[in-house]
Amino acid sequence: MNKEYKFSAQELESQISHLKEKEITELSINDLSLAKDKKKLLRLINKLAAEAPDVFVSILVDASIIDKEVATAATQIFCSFDIPLEAACKGGKLLFDKKFYASKARLLNDYGLVFGFHLTYGIVEGDTQKSFLDRLDFAIQQYPNHIDFPQTEKNADVTEAHVTGVFSAQDIRYCRDVAFACSTFYTSGRAVPWFLSALKPLRIYPSRFFADFSEWQRCNNCDFKSGFVPEAEKHQAIEKMQLLFLNEKYEEKNKHELLTVVEDIVRINGAMSRLVAENEESTVKTSYNPDYLFSEEAMDFEAFNENVEMEECNVHIFAGSDGPEYEY
């Protein structure tokens, strides 16, 4: 049975040396004072690297303190940065600095670091449905590992969205459902390696895709109001939902000739993610050689379909001495 420990911000550093004896393998740090204090963050990272290098650490970090020094330090540990994407109201206008956040995401991607975003809606004065969807589209374009929406999480201690003259109750429900769809399909579905590639042939924005998926969830009794909890589902169950919905969208757009490519890429990346997350080895039957499915060519589904020959394979995905491996 898994045990859970909670530490105060004051206890955190002194407890790091005891993580191994407590058999703690994952640590989530949501300290608002740490999130904006670069020196404190670097001290914590260095202590983790020295005393708990094998523990996976999720750290709330304000984008303002992310720089090359922080990124270099973070490469020493097994971690993910959780970054709030914040908009601000100035002079009655909602401001969101895309260049600022894009530069931080680009830096983290250049260093090969895992990161995700926190997104909210209807809290800051001047926010609108359109502004939230624009932030969501922007967020997806930065290749985050995950996007968290505290307002869709059960029992989350977070400010509720409030109705204004530019953000109706209907807008709030729409944003909630789109956010929940993203949490299900993208985050719980571990879709980051292939999501933007899958959208390209559909000629559709991420927010529109999630809106359509939220309607699919409603029709299949797995939407927010149904009480469905994507984080509690096994990944294979979410993957099945992904493939069913992608099949519908590709048929709708008359792109059925790409479905074999889509299925191979979703399934083989899903199997790889389960090896990493659950240590689950598996064998996947594919219609294409896995060397191509894991190559840069697979980033463009239409070109892949035109240029790569089919080759049925049974791909065994397993843990090697230096990380995930496959053979066929």
Image (cartoon, rainbow, N blue to C red):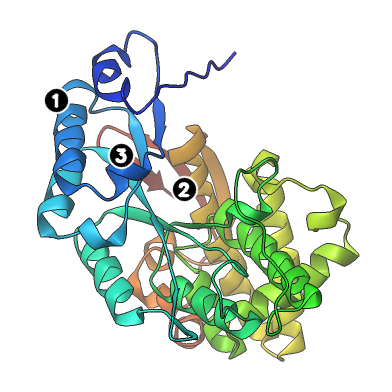
> Residue under circle 2?
272
> Depth-wise, is mark 1 or mark 2 nearer the camera?
1
Vertical arrangement, residue 64 with respect to residue 114, above or below:
below
Label 1 neighbour load within 10 Å: few <14, some 14-19, many 20+: few
Contact flag, marks 3 and 2 (Cβ < 8 Å):
no
Q: Which of pointers 1 and 2 lies earlier in the amino acid sequence? A: 1
> Depth-wise, is mark 3 or mark 1 nearer the camera?
1
> Residue under circle 3?
323
Q: Which of pointers 3 and 1 lies earlier in the amino acid sequence? A: 1
Give the residue at x 27% y 20%.
16
Secondary structure found at label 3: strand
229 horizontally vs 68: left or right: right
Give the amino acid type for the residue marked by disc 3 in the picture: Gly
Secondary structure found at label 1: helix
Real-space Cα distance between discs 3 and 2?
11 Å
Vertical arrangement, residue 41 with respect to residue 139, above or below:
above
Label 2 neighbour load within 10 Å: few <14, some 14-19, many 20+: many
- Which label sits on residue 27? none
Query: Is 162 in front, or is 30?
Result: 162
Q: As drawn, which residue projects farthest toward the front?
A: 91
> Residue under circle 1?
50
Vertical arrangement, residue 45 with respect to residue 95, above or below:
above
